[in-house]
Image (spheres, rainbow, N blue to C red):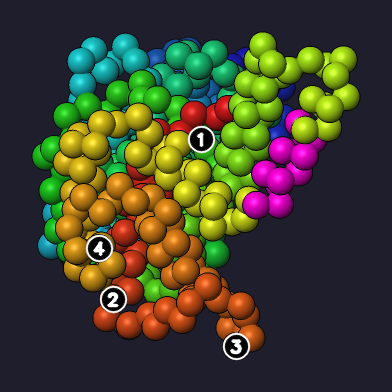
């Protein structure tokens, strides 16, 4: 058949053979995945499903992780706080939003029949079945973002997009989702918890592009079990921009002096004074003061006191519960807040008994959940407000 010979030339990595009344095709990305296509022998031309064959062959498959073709991407996901039901129910986020079909959008549901064909043939666990898993499906990505699947940047960009989606689902809806890899022979034992997805009114991907590094730290932290390591993982969001924020502050101070009427570049005393100021700033600034800078810049920002206290009443409630402040107005003391979250970070990080702590902070085991929720709320707010200098 001419069509078959043409396919063999176009898809050289695939194994294509004719066996009686069907065509047997082994996928180019996995020798385990094959599909049979009927040949209609009742028609003189031996008509075949050429469209279906090409669709199968042009689908890119990453073992146990994802499939992709033009304007369609699907990847296996897992939940840290929600798992599939055994009684046939499923967590589902259906595609929705104004004109979503014309835009880049996503949904999360059971793994599609198409992806199931790939997984069930190539994953060799005992009693493996893809019906117990979910996937994220992203539509129209290539058209909207003008990026071909064969482009080296495609998988980087699509995975960054997944990361952004997961951050929004976690920060806005408490749904903690992550990509997973089924090729490592890990056997899952899902627990049963309910989730309310009714608040999700749109799955259109047109949100603000949050900083990938910060979102990545947050997403990694959210899936850890509650422990001191989870606190440290959320603190990494702040730590990631320590020097960047301080440097930006130093640049602004220096620029203001250079642009002032007072400063003269021809006056050596002026230049020396500027150098001394910068040196003093460098000497005085430490990680504790950098935390305060971050809180000023990306937590409180320019909010009026009344709005600030209302917006972050959940943070002040935790601090009052921990007996670190007596009333919500003390939330305005950013150095006090910075000292506390930094002291807890040190307590959880350092095991050296001679480490010079600012003060002895006895971390009560029962308080660790409140500590984690406090740093989570702060790190989430910083991500939402962060703008790269």
Residue 359 visible (yes or no) = yes
Q: Residues within 10 Å of mark 2 (few under 14, many from 20)?
A: few
Q: Residues within 10 Å of mark 1 (few under 14, many from 20)?
A: some
| Element at label 4 | loop
Q: Residues within 10 Å of mark 4 (few under 14, many from 20)?
A: some
Q: Residue at x 77, y 33 (%)?
A: 273
Q: How far apart are the two marked residues, 1 and 2, measured between alpha carbons?
A: 30 Å
Answer with mark 2 or mark 4, whichever residue precedes in sequence.
4
- Residue 161 rendering spot, x and y as whole percentages: 46, 33
Region of the chain picked out in magenta, as a range: 274-284
Q: Which mark is residue 325?
A: 4
Q: Can you say whether 266 is above or below 300 in the image?
A: above
Q: For mark 2, what is the residue?
A: 367
Answer with mark 1 or mark 4, whichever residue precedes in sequence.
1
Report if the CB atoms under discs 2 and 3 are less than 8 Å apart: no
Q: How many circles with numbers are drawn on the protein? A: 4
| Element at label 2 | helix
Q: In the depicted view, which residue is nearer to us: 66 or 115?
A: 66
Q: Main secondary structure of the magenta part?
A: helix
Q: How far apart are the two marked residues, 2 and 4, measured between alpha carbons?
A: 15 Å
Answer with mark 4 or mark 3, whichever residue precedes in sequence.
4
């Amino acid at each position: 058949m001419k069509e078959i010979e043409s396919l063999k030339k176009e898809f050289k990595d695939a194994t294509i053979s004719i066996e009686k009344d069907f065509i047997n095709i082994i996928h180019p990305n996995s020798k385990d995945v094959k599909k049979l296509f009927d040949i209609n022998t009742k028609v003189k031309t031996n008509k075949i499903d050429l469209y279906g064959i090409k669709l199968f062959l042009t689908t890119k498959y990453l073992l146990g992780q994802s499939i992709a073709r033009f304007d369609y991407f699907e990847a296996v996901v897992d939940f840290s706080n929600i798992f599939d039901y055994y009684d046939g129910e499923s967590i589902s986020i259906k595609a929705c939003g104004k004109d979503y079909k014309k835009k880049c959008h996503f949904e999360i549901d059971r793994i599609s029949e198409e992806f199931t064909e790939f997984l069930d043939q190539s994953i060799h666990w005992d009693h493996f079945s893809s019906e117990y898993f979910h996937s994220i499906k992203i539509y129209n990505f290539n058209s909207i973002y003008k990026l071909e699947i064969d482009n080296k940047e495609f998988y980087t960009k699509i995975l960054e997009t997944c990361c952004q989606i997961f951050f929004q689902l976690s920060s806005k809806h408490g749904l903690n989702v992550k990509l997973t890899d089924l090729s490592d022979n890990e056997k899952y034992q899902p627990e049963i918890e309910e989730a309310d997805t009714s608040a999700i009114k749109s799955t259109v991907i047109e949100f603000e592009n949050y900083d990938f590094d910060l979102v990545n730290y947050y997403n990694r932290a959210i899936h850890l079990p509650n422990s001191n390591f989870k606190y440290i993982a959320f603190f990494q969001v702040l730590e990631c921009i320590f020097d960047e924020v301080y440097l930006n502050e130093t640049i602004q101070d220096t620029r203001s002096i250079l642009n002032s009427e007072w400063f003269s570049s021809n006056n050596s005393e002026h230049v020396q004074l500027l150098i001394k100021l910068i040196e003093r700033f460098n000497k005085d600034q430490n990680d504790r003061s950098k935390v305060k800078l971050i809180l000023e810049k990306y937590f409180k920002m320019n909010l009026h006191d009344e709005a600030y206290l209302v917006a972050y009443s959940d943070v002040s409630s935790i601090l009052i519960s921990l007996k670190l402040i007596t009333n919500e107005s003390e939330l305005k003391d950013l150095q006090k807040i910075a000292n506390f979250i930094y002291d807890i970070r040190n307590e959880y990080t350092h095991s050296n008994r001679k480490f010079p702590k600012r003060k002895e902070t006895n971390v009560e085991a029962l308080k660790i959940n409140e500590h984690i929720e406090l740093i989570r709320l702060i790190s989430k707010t910083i991500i939402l407000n962060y703008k790269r200098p």
